[in-house]
Amino acid sequence: MSVDAETPGRYGRLIQPDRVHGSLYTDPSIFAEELHKIWYRSWVFVGHESEVAQPNDYVRKRLGLQDVILTRDRDGAVHLILNRCAHRGNQVCDDVRGNSSTFRCPYHGWTYRNNGELVGFPFFKGYGTRKLDLSLGRVPRVDSYRGFVFGSFAPDGPGLIEHLGAAAGEIDRLARLSPEGRVQLNAGWLQHQTRANWKLLAENETDGYHPQFVHGSIFGVTGSPIGALYSDASTAVTRNLGNGHSENDLRPEFRKFGEPMRWFGTTESRVPEYVAAMRAAYGTEAECILIEGGPHVMVFPNLFIAEIQVFNIQPVSVGECIQYATAVQLGGAAELNRRMVSQCVGSVGPAGMLLADDTEMYERNQFGIESLAPEWLDIRRGLNRERVDADGFTVGAATDETGMRAFWSQYKTLMEQP
Amino acid sequence: MTSTAESGAALGPVPDGFDRAEVEQFLYREARYADEADYDAWEALWTDDALYWVPVSSTDDPLRQMSVIYDNRSRISTRLNQLRTGKRYAQAPKSNLRRLVSNIEFLGGTANSDGGADLEVGANFLLLESRARGTHLWGGRVTYRLRHKDGALRLAYKKVVLVDDDRPIPTMGFLI
């Protein structure tokens, strides 16, 4: 590769409007830089408040390469603390989830409150004091939006709302599918090991070009109408939402049919309790919500909401990442929730009839990108027909690579920061 | 689905009429069909009320929580039909597979919808998968429920608990 890692403007050369360089997916030094400039600086999705519903609930999570504990303290506040004893570096928590107000290190018995504060340590005379100026590490900024918990290791910078920008409206659209306006992610997460660079996943999530090819096998077998949403004739659009976020806006297609629940692949007669609860909650607005369905949005860098399922992407190394996947669960929608679990189990995870095939593609891409030539990946599709919509967003056709270009624009901005 | 889907359902005594050698031969045959991607033969082993289930450690209730696989008979058919297209890329090309099934125990009986009792069998397995991604060793515990139907053994239930069901696992496109 001819690009010098140390020269300024490196990312300007590696990331161009119509192509990106293969080393972005394979160079360990770029991955190391990403950890510090993206994963440990930007707002990163970690989990959901509904996973720690009760006081003192906790659940282990991954943030970049960090082992973090998402906790809710006795007063209800949510924290992200690092699973590393301040004394000798041991893990203070080895259960995946549980309920406890404290964590006790097994090595020398140091004990911490679930907000990270050091409560005590045995045999204090050896320190000449009962109080030490030590604590568990904390993710300095933790914030949530509609229960989606994000963490940032940067002590200051843009707030979560500023980072989410227009993507917040898509999370609102998800919440509006609940008669109570409430999303829960409490169905457990599948963990899918993926031997590919994390960016291949982020780029694919709003790539409307691949579904008919990668997923043709399952669309054909089930007679699914999803393929048509991502055809050359589709009226759906791919939208750059700013800050690296993008969506496949399928609403134009669903509006054409005007059928409630078509977005979910069913009819209202199959989920009468849900539809009735929605009409009671939203009145005349309900028809629009029931016809348009949920968002299909990629929130930079690692949260993907695909109508009924949510993905959390976390890196492992330059050539490996983990996809965590779960079903959306909606407050006040028990009837729909079971169906969402069932559909989601069929679709996602290591044996999912959709995501296993996506993951096969990611892994083959990663293998192919190691080839010496060509050196570039092409992201020009739709540049010839992009337009700016009434709200000022750049929009491409359903099958255009507008979402990838949105991703790379934000990536370049972050990576070029000192 | 009823609670019989869950492993916690109370087991009755081992039902009469199940021959150990015949059961073992059946389990080995099922394993061979899966290893050799003989989808038609494998599908023909199942009863109409089949359940094929691969939970993860957090799956307490498969109707409310995520599993890797939770297929009723209809979804088994969909899964196999997808494989038969030859464009199920997670399994096209197919993995090369060989598994060992061992520690076979007759665990008891479970009431079935025919008014009889299915034989519940436990076993351990090790499965070597080779594909372009690399070689992967899968292993775990299998619980089967077997039924006599029209003079032959049939499979009503297969639950596969992976030893690494609490960790990230790679794509599992084949029949486990």
Image: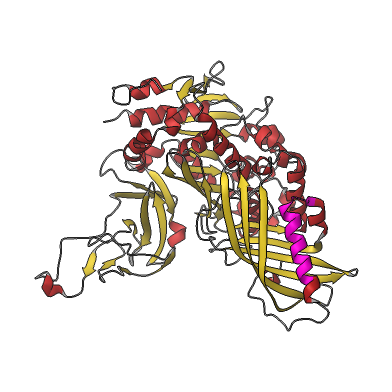
Name the spot of residue A216 as percent of width and height, x first.
71, 36
User: Is A343 in front, or is B46?
Assistant: B46
User: Is A212 in front, or is A178?
Assistant: A212
Looking at the image, which residue is at 71% across and 50% down? A268
Task: Give residue A273's quadrant in the image.
Answer: bottom right
Lateral position of residue B26 relative to residue A390, left or right: right
Looking at the image, which residue is at 56% across and 41% down? A295
Q: What number of labels is visible?
A: 0
Q: Quadrant of the C terminus of chain A?
A: top left
> Can residue A11 be seen here?
yes
As drawn, A385 above or below A309: above
Name the spot of residue B29 as percent of width and height, x first.
77, 61
Looking at the image, which residue is at 41% across and 59% down? A60
Lateral position of residue A293 relative to residue A128, left or right: right
User: Is A267 in front, or is A29?
Assistant: A29
Name the spot of residue B26 as percent of width and height, x first.
78, 66
As drawn, A258 above or below B150: above
User: Is A370 in front, or is B154?
Assistant: A370
Dominant SS in magenta: helix
Task: Give residue B59's quadrant in the image.
Answer: bottom right
Name the spot of residue A51 as percent of width and height, x first.
46, 59
Lateral position of residue B56 relative to residue B117, left or right: left
Q: Which residues are magenta?
A: B23-39
Q: Quadrant of the N terminus of chain A?
A: top left
- Asked if the stretch drawn in magenta spans residue B32, the answer is yes
User: What residue occupies the far top of the structure in this picture?
Assistant: A384
> Can residue A148 be seen here?
no
As drawn, A147 above or below B110: above
Looking at the image, which residue is at 79% across and 73% down? B21
- Asked if the stretch drawn in magenta spans residue B107, the answer is no
Q: How is the image coloured?
A: secondary structure
User: What residue occupies the far bottom of the structure in this picture?
Assistant: B13
